[in-house]
Amino acid sequence: MDKQKIHFVGIAGIGMSAIADVLLDLGYEVQGSDLRQNSETDKLTQKGAKIFQGHEASHIDGANLVVYSSAVTHENVELIAAKDKHIPILRRAEMMAELMRKKRALVVAGSHGKTTTTSMVAHMMLENDLDPTFVLGGRLKSKQSNAYVGKSNWFVAESDESDGSFLHLYPEVAVITNIDQEHLNHYGSFDNLKSAFAQFASSVPFDGLTILCIDDPEVHKILEEINKPVLTVGTHMKAMIRADNIRIEEKYMVFEVWNAKDCLATVELPMLGKHNVLNALGAFAVGLRVGLAPKNIAKALKKFKGIDRRMDYYGQIEGVDMYDDYAHHPTEILATLIALKKKAGLGVVHVLYQPHRYTRLRDTWQKHIEVFDYTDRVYVTPVYEASETPIEHITSERLVEEINARGKTKALYVASIAKGVESAKQNSKPGDIICSMGAGSITQAMTLLK
């Protein structure tokens, strides 16, 4: 039988490239297209994939299946051509479901923290010789990859809730980290989004498990709508698996993990921030579910090297600590800023921020203005458009004006990443922190700082 040829529309995205990577390792012929090429497409090319820059109808010639990302519209010429030629078309999540069909699936969902939590689960299972297949939304540093084909029957992945397609996934174990007001263009209302999460939580089998972080009030609210086994986690006193005695010791977040009666383990997590404690707690609960001893879970978490662009530390330059972070939603930004401020102590935190997508900035406008109350200085670059068209009045210049009008943080508009780096360097002194932040090209700042 000839190898099946699978074409990916929007292959450069971190989630799409991960699935393509897995399919290459499984022996499929993989090709794809995107507007830009990047390190992910370079890696796929080295493994034998054919990558097209730009979209053309002819790209899908000979394909047996077309997979498209949630960022691709139905007006895409390749999707139209595939439909005209009666080539099967699947969304990313539907392709993921196909890969999971014969596996024991562990899926992490949520508005924030899911890539970190999923990566912790994958790392923990690898450290304990469970050798899972994984598909991640970030690059696991210990494997230097966002995808891996393991020898066991476990499949670890994170969901994409943006278009509702995560409801095609039917995991044995589901984790929900939190629920925030995102993707309302698709769902129509926040209530509909919460209902979708409840439906996902109820998609596990009768002998499966959904792990819920009830520190998040919106997750707490959907508990009554779930009709399958549930394990709650958090710092909340009613959580079935609870983190207590949380503290910072050097570069570690240290905390105890308790069930109703006993302290199961003390975890030393090499990541800052309470939000990462909650992420680790979700991973810890998964470890218990798959039969790992608490001490072995804690041992694995202590060795967690993290994922790319989650408070990545780039060292010191003239006494100033350099960090890079993926945060681009106000909830994520807040968690990172709180962790940085604790780390800086009396030092000044300088944030070089690149807003991501006009629609996201519009939908979270007021929260974007308020969240920078928690830093000292913010240098705002132009919006990273991610293929979107500009929206009137939704600009970085106006964002800076409104942040300054609050009088709590000094904000400066910078016309480019390079100019932002220059300003941050001029204004910083030993003991300060500079952090580049955003989901677009802002990570280039770390190269420029050096």
Image: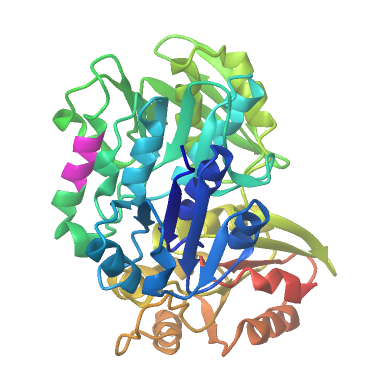
Q: Identify the coloring.
A: rainbow
Question: To which quarter of the image does residue 433 belong?
Answer: bottom right
Q: Residue at x 60, y 55 (%)?
A: 44
In the rendered structure, the answer to whether residue 338 lies left or right of residue 216 reads right
Report the number of discs. 0
Residue 421 in picture, x, y percent from top left:
68, 80
Which residue is nearer to you in this view: 65 or 409?
65
- Residue 274 in view, yes or no: no
Which residue is nearer to you in this view: 263 or 25?
25
In the rendered structure, the answer to whether residue 370 lies left or right of residue 130 reads left
Q: Residue at x 55, y 45 (%)?
A: 24
- Residue 164 in view, yes or no: yes
Q: Which of the image's four quarters has the C terminus? A: bottom right
Give the answer, above or below, for where 220 lies relative to 60. above
Report the residue that reaches farthest toward the top.
261
Which residue is nearer to you in this view: 430 or 300?
300
Which residue is nearer to you in this view: 206 or 9?
9
Give the answer, above or below, for where 382 lies relative to 374. below
Report the residue that reaches farthest toward the front.
1
Residue 364 in picture, x, y percent from top left:
32, 69
Is residue 73 on the magenta stretch? no
Q: Which residues are magenta?
A: 194-200
Report the residue that reaches farthest toward the right.
318
Residue 368 in picture, x, y percent from top left:
39, 71
The majority secondary structure of the magenta stretch comes to helix
Question: To which quarter of the image does residue 309 belong?
Answer: bottom right
Residue 169 in picture, x, y percent from top left:
30, 37
Q: Residue at x 20, y 50 (%)?
A: 193
